[in-house]
Amino acid sequence: MSKKIKNAFYAQSGGVTAVINASACGVIETARKHPDKIGKVYAGRNGIIGALTEDLIDTSKESDAAIAALRSTPSGAFGSCRYKLKSLETNRREYERLIEVFRAHDIGYFFYNGGGDSADTCYKISQLSETMGYPVQAIHVPKTVDNDLPITDNCPGFGSVAKYIAISTLEASFDVRSMCKTSTKIFVIEVMGRHAGWIAAAGGLVEDYGFPVVILFPEIEFDPEKFLARVDKMVKKHGHCTVVVSEGCHYPDGKFIAEQGIKDVFGHAQLGGAAPIVANMIKNALGHRFHWAVADYLQRAARHIASRTDVKQAYELGKAAVDLALKGKNSVMPAIIRVSDEPYKYRIGHAELKDVANVEKFMPLDFISKDGFGITEKCKRYLRPLIQGEDYPKYEDGLPVYVSLKNMPVERRLPEFSL
C-alpha cells in the first residue's frame, strides 16, 4: 500500500513585512511542484489562530498567477496575529487542539513563518506531535524586521526595512541641510527595534554621503548629557544633525525613553514616541528648531522600495522550508549562511529549532562605534549587501499593483474551540 499523501499547513505570525508574502509564495509554489508528496497547502486565517479555530484557507483555489503575485505584495496575504501560545505545562489544550486540527485535515507538514515566538511554537509542536502519536514535520520559516534571530546571518524583512530607513534618513538629511541656515537644524527619525538596534544601524549608512548622524541603540544605555554633547558638536561642525532613535532606547535602569505606561498583548511595555521626546530634549537644552517622524508601519510595509536581495532570500527560504520537509527534516529552520561580504555570497543551510527558540541576536559591539552613537565599517560591510538592488512591483495608473487573494475557507470538521 502506498503512503498516504499529507497536506501542509502554512501560517504567518507577528508583525508582517514587505517580503513575508514572498516566503509564502516560495512555500506554495514549491509544494505545488510535488503533488506526489504534498497534497493541498492550507493557510491559517490570521496566523496560528486560524489553526486553533479551524479557520483554514484552501490555497489550491488560487491561480498560479495569484500565488506568483504574492512575491511583490506587502503585508500578510492570509492575515497574521500577535498570539503567543503559553508553555506546554500551563496550556496543553491549545497544543493538543492544533494536533487535532492537523489530524482532521490530514496535515503532516507545518510551516510557520515568523520570528522568535513562532520558532518556539514550532519547536513545541514538533515535540508534542510525536508524543500524541500523530507526527508532524514542523519547519520554521524565518521572518522579522528586527533581524534578531540567531544562527541565520539575517532575517527576511530586515533588508527591505534597512533600505527604507537608509533612504529615508538620507533624503531627510538632504532636506534639513538645505534649511539649517535659517530654519530646522535637527531631524529625528524613530525606528523599530525593541531590544536590537539593527534597523537603527541602517541610518548610519548616510555617513558615506558626509551627513552627520547620531544613532541611539537599545544596546547602549542612554546618557542624556553625552547625547546632547554629541548633537551640539555635530551642529557646530556641520550646521545640522540627523538623529536616528530606536524605539528600544532606554535609560541605565532599563526604562524605555518612550515607555507609555501601558502593555501590549505580550505584556511588553507599549513603545512609541521616542522621537518627540528626544527632539524636545534637544530643543530645551540647545535651542535648535526641529522636525521629527516615526517610521512605524511605513518602514515594514514599503514594498515599493524593497531590497532585491531581501525579496530573493525571502522566497528562497520559503522554498528551502519545503525542500527540508521533503528530505524528512523536522524541528528545523532554513538559514542564510554568509560566505563573504565583498563580493557578497551566501548559501542556504539550516538550524535546529532548539537552538533558535527564545534566543535573541543583538548588535555586536564591534558594529557600534566606540562613542556609542554610530556604526563601524564592519557594520557597513554587513549592511550594504542586504539593501542592494530594487525589485519594483508593476505599476498601473501611478500606483503599484498588489494582489488580494480569494482566501476560500476549508469546511470545518471539528467542534468550535474558544481561545
Image: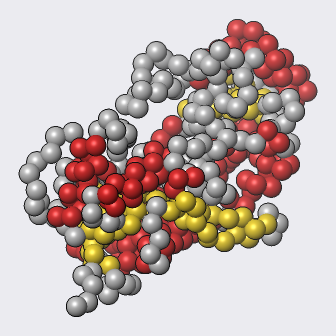
Quarter of the image with the N terminus is bottom left
Figure check: 232 above or below 203: above
Residue lying at the far bottom in this picture: please name it.
Answer: 1
Residue 29 position by quadrant: bottom left
Image quarter of residue 25: bottom left
In this rendering, the answer to whether 344 lies above or below 123 is below
Say whether residue 18 is left or right of residue 52.
Answer: right
Is residue 105 shown left or right of residue 332? left
Q: Residue at x 70, y 8 (%)?
A: 284
- Would residue 325 be visible to someone looking at this image? yes
Residue 51 vs residue 177, the one in the foreground: 51
* In-image side of 342 versus 13 (left or right): right
Res. 76 visible in picture: no
Rendering coords of residue 81 (x, y %): 34, 45
The residue at the point 66 percent across, 71 percent down is: 347
In the image as oriented, which residue stretches furthest toward the right? Answer: 237
**Where residue 248 sits: x, y (%)?**
60, 29
Compared to 388, does 326 lie above or below?
Answer: below
> Residue 142 in the image: x percent, y percent?
51, 57
From the viewer's side, name the closer residue of 194 and 287.
194
